[in-house]
Every structure is written in C-alpha cells, then in structure tokens.
Amino acid sequence: MTSLSKLTELMAALRDPQSGCPWDIKQTSKSISSYTLEETYELLHAIQSDDIENLKEELGDLLFHIVFHAQIANEQNKFDINDVVKNIVDKMTRRHPHVFEKDRDNQLSEKELKNQWKQLKQNEKFSSSRILDNIGHKFPALIRAQKLQDAAAEYYFDWPEVNPVLDKIEEEIAELREAMNSGNKDHIQDEMGDILFACTNLARHIDVDAEAALRQTNEKFIRRFDFVVKQMEKAGIAFSPSQLEQMETFWQQSKSVTG
C-alpha cells in the first residue's frame, strides 16, 4: 500500500526551490484555489455518474490539492499535513460523542443525531453580529441559499407548505418583469436573485437538493443540445437565427431520444 507520506514527499520534491517544477514552485494557495474547486466539482461529477474508476482518480486529484495546500503552509511554518489530519480526527471525534465517549448513548434517533451535530458544530463557531453570517458562508451561492433557508426554518421563519412558495415565485417573476421594463440593471439583478432564492426554497419544500437538481439538468441540457447539433449537421442545415424553428423541432425530438 502506498502511504500518504509518499505523496507528501512527492509534493515536497515538486516544490523544491533548487530541483522542483517551476510551475509548482511559484504557486500559492490563492493561485491554485480555482483548480482545487474544479477538482471538487469533477469529483462530484464522478459520484453522480457512478463511475468508480473516475471516482478513484478524482479522489486522488483532490487529495493532491490538499497536500499541495498543506505543503505551502508548511513552507511558511504555519502547519503541515499531519496537523491537517490531526485537526479532522479531533473534530470528528468531538462531533461523535455517541461513538467515542466512554458513557456514550449510541441509541440516538436520526433526528437527535442531526440536532446534536448542529449544536456541537455551532459551539465551535465564533459568534457574529448577524445571526446568519456564519451559515454556509464558504459555499457557492445556490448551496448557501438552501442552508440559510434551513437555518431560518429552525426559527420557524418558513412557509408552512409548498403552495405559498409557488405563489412567491410567481410574484417574483412579475417583479422581474417590472424591473426589466424599467431598464435598471441593479434592480433587474436584484429581482433575478429573488427568483433564484425562491426557487431554491421550493426545492427545500419538495425535498429536492437544488444543487444536485441543477447539475442533473446541466447534464440533460448537454445531451439534448448534442442531439440537436448532430441532427442539424446530418440534415446539412447551417446554424442561423432563421433556423430556430427547426432547432426547436430537433430539441423536442431529443427528449424522447436522450431522456
């Protein structure tokens, strides 16, 4: 078995000022952060695709980035990979008292475990002047919106059922139409954000993960658009605004062919 130390040794060699890779040497945590995010999304795609070989590869790519960031911090005498591992082991041990404490209660229900996790996590956070500041602030906007709504719901600030949420979406669409008529870009962006937020809320109420749903739709769009392109090429039809009706016909066909 190849140990983690082999990977850390490889990373140190890549970063060696005298004999390492020029590209790796000049990188900082900020400069590679976008690549780290890309690897995370590629890992999610492998999981969604149920592709085991790709999953193994993408886990390795993400692990490489974790070691990369840790090596940079180690060179700055901040922390190393061992500190990273110790930190997560300590945190997971602390957040699972029902598993690791001597007088543990391992008969907790799923709801009780969820509440215990939230409370233990909250105890570790620094307080903020605004109650929701720390909720999902490191996540992309769509995921954070769902987490913010979940947090507000704990204070009973939530629609009691789904129909008012649908009404709210229709209300926001009407307000967007008004904003578009005004031509005010800031107002348009604000109202567009309200629609996305309301749609995320709808996903919560029908027990759908908004991020996962959008990823699924992205993949569906790729399949269907690919079908349209291939049918246009097969028919020898050039892409142009005058061919929108024909493209729409192929698009409708794609639904039964590609799913």
Image: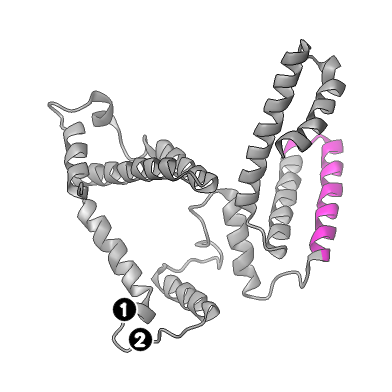
Marking on residue 19? none
Determine whether 111 is above or below 250 in the image. below
Q: Nearer the viewer, residue 110 or 125?
A: 110
Q: Residue at left 76%, top 43%?
A: 187
Determine whether 209 is above or below 67 in the image. below
The answer, for residue 112, to whether it is visible in the render is: yes
**Residue type marked 2:** Arg
Q: Residue at left 18%, top 43%?
A: 6
Relative to residue 212, is residue 69 drawn left or right? Answer: left
- x and y, in percent, of residue 30 in the image: 37, 39
The quadrant in which residue 11 appears is top left
Relative to residue 30, is residue 76 drawn left or right? Answer: left
Callout 2: 10 Å neighbours few (<14), some, many (20+)?
few
- x and y, in percent, of residue 186 in the image: 72, 40
Magenta stretch bounds: 163-185
**Residue type marked 1:** Phe
Placement of the C terminus among the 4 image quadrants: top right
Which residue in the structure is indicated by mark 2? 104
- x and y, in percent, of residue 29 in the image: 33, 40
Relative to residue 217, is residue 24 drawn left or right? Answer: left
Q: Are marks 1 and 2 in contact (CB under 8 Å)?
A: yes
Mark 1 element type: helix
Mark 2 element type: loop
Which residue in the structure is indicated by mark 1? 100
